[in-house]
Image (tube, helix red, strand yellow):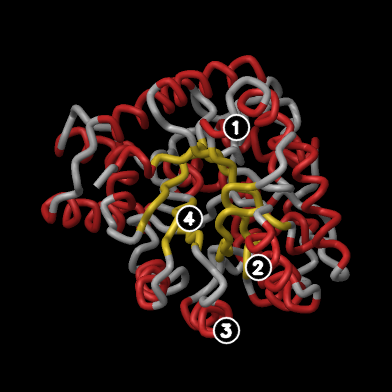
Amino acid sequence: MNYKSKFGFGCMRLPLTDENDPTSINQELFNEMVDIYMEKGFNYFDTSYAYHNGTSEIAIKKAVVERYPRESFKICDKMPTWALTSKDDNEKFVNEMLERLGIDYFDVFFIHNINVPWLELAEKSNTFEYVKKMKEEGTAKKIGISFHDNAKLLEKVLKKYSDILDIVQLELNYLDWEDPSIEAHKCYDLCVKYGLDVYVMEPLKGGVIVNPSQEIKDEFKNYNSEKSIASFALRFCASLDNVKMVLSGMNKMEDLMDNCDTYENFKVITDDEKEFLSKMANKLYETLAVPCSECGYCIKECPSMIPIPKYFNIYNASKNQPESNIYRLYYDKLADEEVPADDCTYCGTCLDYCTQKIDIPEELENVCKHFENGFSPYAGEF
């Protein structure tokens, strides 16, 4: 099996010149990363209408489409399901995406983020029928869905649409593999049952896997000091037979080089390594305050536009480093510059859109309590 063909460049988290501005893509660095990625024989780029507030596609056009022959690369894009209001929106968004990218067909095209509310929007807008037509007419070579929900909903969708789909893109990683709220293992098995290829997103769970406590980092180092934590996670996913693509969002050159090394010297995950990763998953869950993958879908639905993933990121880091008070400063700074966490009205609108099935209002309350009770921003050493 050619494992090199399984390494996809995820373009949801590209390098930035300003970390607070998702549209400030560092085009020069991205171009350099693309050149190395392509020179090493990799060629798959995954984007979306929404990534980087619409500028991810434009960056790919500049870095890839305008600099390489069309037959030398593959591009996957996705229908912005949440924005669909009518059947006419399908063609409107597809034409806009093609224009942004500067191409006349997609190698892969997904209906983005199928969950309970957005499945309803897609069906009302006849989007499944529309993407089927895209494939028939050659506007998309392969079609599928990206999926963020439980196995019960996935089976409902596959019973109805598997005959027209080629691929299901799943959140899949060793941390979520047996998680009862994510059901990654069950969802993978359903794709196998219906004969569909699996493309993997969030193999590092939005960075959660590669940013554990120091104790877990030390255990990985003791187990194998020559391999990165990320390499174990990528190999876990790519070793699965029905997985044909594993995306990795890379915004640093060292991340790209490490991932290239993983696939250029690929070794199928062993049973002993699987057992070790299972133990690490259990330990990581014990130290993780909130299992947020930072996808950001909740923000789109929050009436107050609270930057929920940022608060959870700071909260997780603070829990992992309780001796440091720097995270209280980050918390206060975020509240001042954006929206305070305690602006949550407990409306619950976000709950249906959380890919991790987190009780967001309750966890935001925990965040507030954590930082507002007993944390002095000036105590201790920074």
Q: Nearer the viewer, residue 202 or 264?
A: 264
**Of helix, strand and loop, which one carries label 3?**
helix
Tell which tag, 3 or 1, sits nearer the viewer.
1
**Of helix, strand and loop, which one carries label 1?**
helix
Cα separation, mark 2 vs mark 4, equals 42 Å
Cα separation, mark 4 vs mark 1, equals 45 Å
**Of helix, strand and loop, which one carries label 4?**
loop
Q: With 116 as the anchor, is 188 left or right in this view? A: left
The amino acid pointed to by label 3 is: Lys
Residue at image location 62% in from the left, 33% down from the top: 377
Cα separation, mark 1 vs mark 2, equals 23 Å
- Residue situated furthest left in the rendering: 272
Cα separation, mark 3 vs mark 1, equals 34 Å
Q: Earlier in the sequence, mark 2 or mark 4?
A: 2
Q: Position of residue 229 (x, y in %)?
A: 31, 38
- Find residue 70 and name its label: 1
Residue indicated by mark 2: 132
Residue at image location 65% in from the left, 63% down from the top: 136
Q: Earlier in the sequence, mark 4 or mark 1?
A: 1
Q: Earlier in the sequence, mark 3 or mark 2?
A: 2
Q: Position of residue 380 (x, y in %)?
A: 50, 28
Q: Nearer the viewer, residue 214 or 180?
A: 180
Residue at image location 82% in from the left, 58% down from the top: 91
Q: Is residue 333 visible?
A: no
- Find residue 160 and name its label: 3
Categorize mark 4 by other alpha carbons within 10 Å: few (<14), some (14-19), many (20+): some
